[in-house]
Amino acid sequence: MKKLLFVLGLFIVAQVNAQSVTVGKNIYTDIPDITKQQIINALDSLVYKIGVGKLNINDVEQDKGELTVSILKDQQADINDTTSQKQLINMYPVAPGQYFISIAVIRSSGPKPLLKKIINLIASNRDGKITVALPLNYLTRLWEARKVGNIIYHYPDEINIDRAKKFNEKNTLIPTKLGLQPEVMDFYLCNNYQEILPLLGLGYSAEANGNTRNGYGVDANCIFSVLHNEDFSHDLFHYYAARVRKVPRNSAAEEGIAYSWGNAYYTDEKGEMILQKDLVIQLRLYLQQHPDASLYDMFSKNPTIFNSMAKVRSVISGVICDEVERQKGTSGIIALINCGKGDDNYLAAVNSLININKTNFDTAVKALLK
């Protein structure tokens, strides 16, 4: 029994040590020692709660608190990685009672240390209690803000109001079609994905190196743009679809509807969102040039046929979903959303709704494309 307790004690110590934050040897700060220690203690507690999955809204600043919790929970794998060291590498005051802090996650295994990411946070001292937040509000404090319907746009330089109005219309149309109420969104306009990361507290991320074309969201009613475009209706559909979905997500169904009701997520060379109607035209042209091509093979294998990041599988599914909506209305769309994971479930639902199956897939979809 004593041996068991001893082993258990070693395990607990190892877990705490794996999750705790060390202080970098070269760190310098003019923050008073008592405040510095309070911040370090708070970080240890924060990292521990992330690691054991107990972080909640009461552990962070309430403004954008749900987003802070969501982003920090995403760091759980790195926090629990016993081959990685969590090290406080910088801390400095930015306002009375507020401090910018940086934590490096460094993989210590292998021939030499590897920097995996740097997590930046704003720590606030409220009568001796330290709470943290993403640096989002701090880094955008000088940005402009403009409300367009239910969308609050935040931007450092300019905004395309026509696009913003169209997105606000989609933020009304999509939930209304699904029987939901439109929600208020905070929308941050960034030039590329690398500009989004610091707002989300990632000063550096090895896994995101070179990634520029993505956006982020909808997370806690916050959206971060794809290449400064005011339209994020692709993922807006996914956000609202999750409200009516009762089973694991079917990617074919939801991507098809997202392409049709929203867009293809990425922008074209002119900075405009790639639209389903334009992709359908390109698919028709491809079929004219490749008369022996199988639409079912394209759907199942998703080859690259467009000069963009758009997916032919999703375009084909979008055409099918449009026909489901035409024949069965919104109830048919919700049936697709709830058809269950996997292509077999998707095709079974489509066959039940509009009689398209593996046997007649090419003939039926070609007819819809015409």
Image (cartoon, helix red, strand yellow):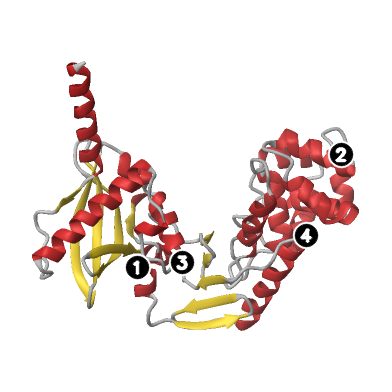
Q: Earlier in the sequence, mark 1 or mark 3?
A: 1
- Label 2's element? helix
Residue 176, position in %: x, y?
75, 65
- The residue beneath circle 3 is 192
Rounded to the nearest whole Å, what is the CA distance between mark 4 and mark 1?
43 Å
Mark 2 residue type: Ser
Rounded to the nearest whole Å, what is the CA distance between mark 3 and mark 4?
28 Å
- Label 4's element? helix
For the residues carrying marks 2 and 4, which lies nearer the camera in this image?
2
- The residue beneath circle 1 is 135
For the residues carrying marks 3 and 4, which lies nearer the camera in this image?
3
Residue 30, position in %: x, y?
10, 70
Whether pointer 4 and pointer 1 mark residues with C-beta atoms closer than 8 Å, the reply is no
Classify residue 50 as left or right of residue 235: left
Mark 3 residue type: Asn
Whether pointer 1 and pointer 3 mark residues with C-beta atoms closer than 8 Å, the reply is no
Rounded to the nearest whole Å, what is the CA distance between mark 3 and mark 2?
42 Å
